[in-house]
Image: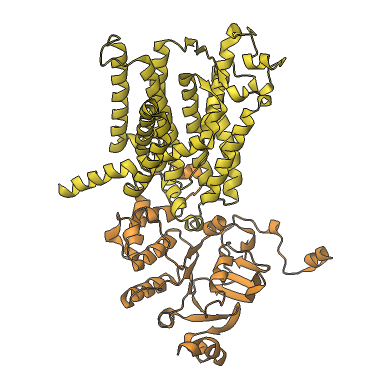
Amino acid sequence: MWLTRPFYERSTQLFLGILFAALLVVTVLHVALPEGHPLHVTSYTVTLFGKYLCYALLAVAVDLVWGYLGILSLGHGAFFALGGYAMGMYLMRQIGDRGTYGDPILPDFMVFLNWQELPWYWLGFDMAWFAFIMVLLAPGLLALVFGFLAFRSRVTGVYLSIITQALTFALMLAFFRNEMGFGGNNGLTDFKDILGFNLRTDATRLGLFLATGVALAIGYVVCRAIVTSKLGRVSVACRDAEARTRFLGYRVERVQLFVFVVSAMLAGVAGALYVPQVGIINPSEFSPIFSIEIVVWVALGGRATLYGAVIGAILVNYAKTVFTGVMPDAWLFALGALFVLVTVFLPQGIAGLLKSRHTAKEAAA
Amino acid sequence: MSIMSELTNRDRVFDFLTPSDSPVDVRHGPILYLEDVNVSFDGFRAINNLNLTIDDGELRCIIGPNGAGKTTMMDIITGKTRPDTGSVWFGSRHNLLTKSEPDIASLGIGRKFQKPTVFEALTVFENLELAMAADKRILPTLTAIMQPQYRDRIDDVLQTIGLKDLRDKLAGILSHGQKQWLEIGMLLMQKPRLLLVDEPVAGMTEQEMERTAELLTGLAGKQSVVVVEHDMGFVRSIARKVTVLHQGSVLAEGTMDEVSNDPEVIKVYLGEEA
């Protein structure tokens, strides 16, 4: 079976081992140790780690299209945000009549805008299964339509990057409008509970953190299964010599479309897990800067390795948390400097460093 | 008016009369048939009333000075360039002008580019694996499993092209000549009926050239091979029939001796070299 192939790989076993060990350690330190103990992990930190794991899953999705297919998407934030909005709509409907205005159906912002009834595209979002399907479907469908048009006309390289950037920018402007019915500028917030669990309790937060860890593990294995399959080798072939691949009889645009849609869905899942943990989704997630930042994480971690993307996402975001705490103004400069240094001295990112040490050890042995 | 002339054109074969999935029909001899093909780029006539017939199992060399339209002709056959007028048939059933590049490839036309293009980030074995004739749609490719008989076939081709020892090396580290052979090997994996080979010995050493000549002559008979080449020595060593292209149309056709004694040919081409 192609899906089980990654489990026989040493690198995947190692990755899953480290990931689950980390989840276990955080859980134990959070639950078993009393508050005030120096090693106690606070609920705030658990949620922060959960956020890093969402970013890690998003980075894996970007690495799948950039590293293995050669498509530099500068708009993956759009898929992440769409997944987030689908989840946010479900969480809004769960509030029920506990909102400020106490309307049993309409979310607060709609009452505020004097809307009389729920727009049609909000129907069904009170049901968890429907919302969770939309988490995959909304980004997947956008990627399908966008990719179909772009790849069919053989748009690649810088031009494709620019239109992905335009895509996310256009969506940002659209979601800023109140008339769109997604809460405009303020987005969706004030969530109360998810699947009946109160979002403010420590147990729910820990549960979301663990769910994100499991989602990252599944996402990683799915990507790994794709890149180690024959289709993965075909996508590398499309990346390196598109015309040659076409003359071998492969439909390059369909390969690109397939991988792009899978990647968009993974990004959507990451967004959906992100929203209940940070407690808000607003149009700033669509901002082009965010999408570029994702690419920086992947570049730092190392392209075309998948685990490199995870390392990059976690490291950069940890650094961001530290920096914005200590010197908020210096963060963007630090990020820029980091990016330049890595591009110059570590063109293959941190994963490249790990790899070269590994091969050096093998050569010595 | 134009409909009337279309209908009364006796050569016209309607698309619905030619099933697209039928095997290549070579009962009438030719496997490739180009008639009155014209292409111009921005007013420049790259191909000018070109007529060319390749028989099944033939090894044909095509020579001609730079700009004679050799590569453009290959582009037309493989579906990369659409001619302004004319018709191109593969066997007597497949109208190539209505088909896309991957369709043409899966019909059984393989192409080797002028510059060797192999997948450098993949191993020699994986390069051949991707080229192998198989179901090339998305899901079958995703779930494809390496079967023992596939492995044997790849090993056979590795033997033929002499890269057996480099099986698991990345294609990026191969020498120029080895890349050319690997690319020919990839064409063989496709099990093509017709091979189009663009300048196979450019940049090769004498020995490598000899090896390539053996490889190509070994293929003829089983497959039809069309070789476009500049190197006259190489052409002389493999060619049975040579076509000379000049300014987008056929100037002369025949054995190497006939062609090289043709006064027209000497004037436009061999004259400059000799």
Is B193 on the left-hand or right-hand side of A97?
Answer: left
Residue B30 at what x, y percent from top left? 57, 71
Q: Residue A194 in the image: x percent, y percent? A: 50, 14
Q: Residue furthest left?
A: A365
- How many numbered marks have been drawn onto this rendered protein structure? 0
Quadrant position of the N terminus of chain A in the picture: top left
Asked if one can make out residue B40 in the rendered structure from this viewpoint, the answer is yes
Q: Residue at x 54, y 29 (%)?
A: A284
Residue B36 seen in render: no
Most extreme residue toward the right is B1
Judge whether A280 appears above or below A249 on screen: above
As drawn, B244 above or below A289? below
**Quadrant of the rendered structure where residue A207 is?**
top left
Instruction: Indicate whether A277 appears above or below A316.
Output: above
Q: For this rendering, which residue is in front, B113 or B189?
A: B113
**Front-lying residue, A8 or A183:** A183
Q: Which chain is yellow?
A: A
* Image location (x, y in percent) of residue A28: 29, 15
Q: How is the image coloured?
A: by chain
| Residue drawn at point x = 37 percent, y = 15 percent | A43
Up the image or down, A102 lies above or below A260; here it is above
Q: Position of residue B222 (x, y in %)?
A: 45, 68
In the picture, measured across the screen, residue A248 lies left or right of residue B149, that is right
Q: Which chain is orange?
A: B
